[in-house]
Amino acid sequence: MGIQAGARMDRYVDREIVQRILKFLDAGVLFAASIFISLLSATDLSTTTPQVIGFLAIELSLVCVFAMRSFGLYDVGAMTQGPWTALRATAISFMLGGLLYLLTHRFLLEMDFGWMYLWMMVLPAYFGITRVAVSLWAAPRAAEGRFRQRVAIVGGGRSAEDALNLLESSTGLDIEIIGLFDDRDDARSPQSIRAYHKIGRIEELAQYARSQRVDLIVVAIPLSAETRLLTILKRLWELPVDIRISGQSSSLKLNARAYTYLGKLPLLSVFDRPLKGWQLIQKEALDRVLSVLMIIALAPVMLGVALAVKLESKGPVIFRQKRYGFNNELIEVFKFRSMYTDRCDASAAKLVTKDDPRVTKVGRFIRRTSLDELPQLFNVLLGQLSLVGPRPHATQAKAADALYETVVDGYFARHRVKPGITGWAQINGWRGETDTRDKLEQRVKHDLEYIDRWSMGFDLYIILKTPIVLLRGENAY
């Protein structure tokens, strides 16, 4: 099962988010259309009761959305069949609208028969446009399996088999079971359970999840195996993946409200991906909008910095450096060049220190004021960075003569979200040089605290606080 190594898959698309957006859009358009059509069709506007029209518009829009939901017109399959879905949505809304028109005209408000003609014109136009547009977007993503949650099972033997049995017997569950990961190679953990094969050891799951798309990890091990369970979770918690413990094989039976369910399989929540669903949409929308506004507002400043860099020393104005991004993916970060071209350190094997001879005069100024970071607004616009998040580190950056990931336990957990131009660590004084274990530990501590505390308000607070911190010019070389 699963995909072949190296075939990178795009991000999972949460169908519930797409469905909610479409439902809200339908309800809003149908509400506005019914209000407008009712006002046009009322035989005597002087006797028209706004409250009655408003109530009927709300009722009609909600009833139509509920009926379309009941007929499965918001399912992924319907989203990929634009014309056919548009025809069915039009028929359902037309019949419900006609019924409500007859009842309204008969008992509440005298209306012209032209209401039905206008309603008949609006529905095919609206549903035709929206459903065809949605299908053009959804069809290729459905073909790529991006609406299907990819699940990895950790464990083997009886516990894993019980979990697989419950998942297979669940109706309407659209998931892809990637395969099994287990350290044991004996009778307790066979190489395959029916069609599901063992892909590797548990320690290899982290590497697999960084090269393939894994949306959910189900640890199918009894809670009684406490030591083994803790060892497994310690290996996996750095991943930006939902991690659950299968509850079906545990002798400890908790209250039903303690479980979430994947089909018939009860699960205990252990770790959640920090940002997903509406939170991810909100953060990315904020990033895109603010980055565009900031690029426009700071364009004269960036032009001035570029000119100063170019006039002082030969070489490109923009310095590109490979750094760790979300889920340890390598991204190319843009900066104004602050060093002499022949002394640039693309891998950051040597940290920049105070009075570093590699740094130009202009470079010292733009590093101290963080003006060298302004081109990273384009990284935000491209979706590689966020405005706020853990600062991206170069691949060979070191503290105490050791790579960052070997200095601090759980270092890669900071990559569970996109890195940012500024962050909680930076506004608390942990910016600039990270040459000692203590400095790196403090930065990682604040990064993890930011991930746990994330909210839109928290992001805005950090953005507003950043200029104040930059004016102090502390720890910037």
Image (spheres, helix red, strand yellow):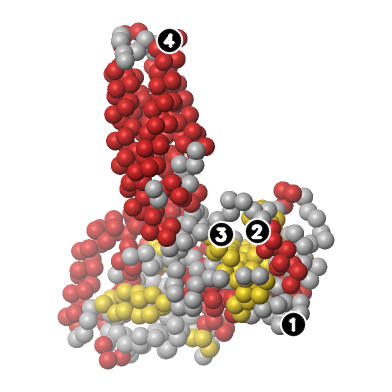
Residue found 44% across the figure and 83% down from its top: 395
Q: Earlier in the sequence, mark 2 or mark 4?
A: 4
Q: Alpha-carbon neighbours of circle 3 within 10 Å: few (<14), some, or many (≥20)?
A: some
Residue 337 in the image: x percent, y percent? 28, 80
Q: Are marks 3 and 4 in contact (CB under 8 Å)?
A: no
Residue type of the residue flagged with mark 3: Ile
On the image, numbered disc 2 is attached to which residue? 167
Q: From this viewpoint, is residue 160 visible?
A: yes
Q: Is residue 139 left or right of residue 167?
A: left
Q: Alpha-carbon neighbours of circle 4 within 10 Å: few (<14), some, or many (≥20)?
A: few
**Dot 2: what SS?**
helix
Residue found 52% across the figure and 82% down from its top: 404
On the image, numbered disc 4 is attached to which residue? 106
Residue type of the residue flagged with mark 4: Arg
Return the mark for residue 420.
none
Residue 255 in the image: x percent, y percent? 77, 50
Q: From this viewpoint, is residue 432 visible?
A: no
On the image, numbered disc 1 is attached to which residue? 186
Q: Up-down: is 337 above or below 162?
A: below
On the image, numbered disc 3 is attached to which residue? 175
Residue 343 in the image: x percent, y percent? 31, 91
Residue found 68% across the figure and 53% down from its top: 264
Q: Are marks 2 and 3 in contact (CB under 8 Å)?
A: yes
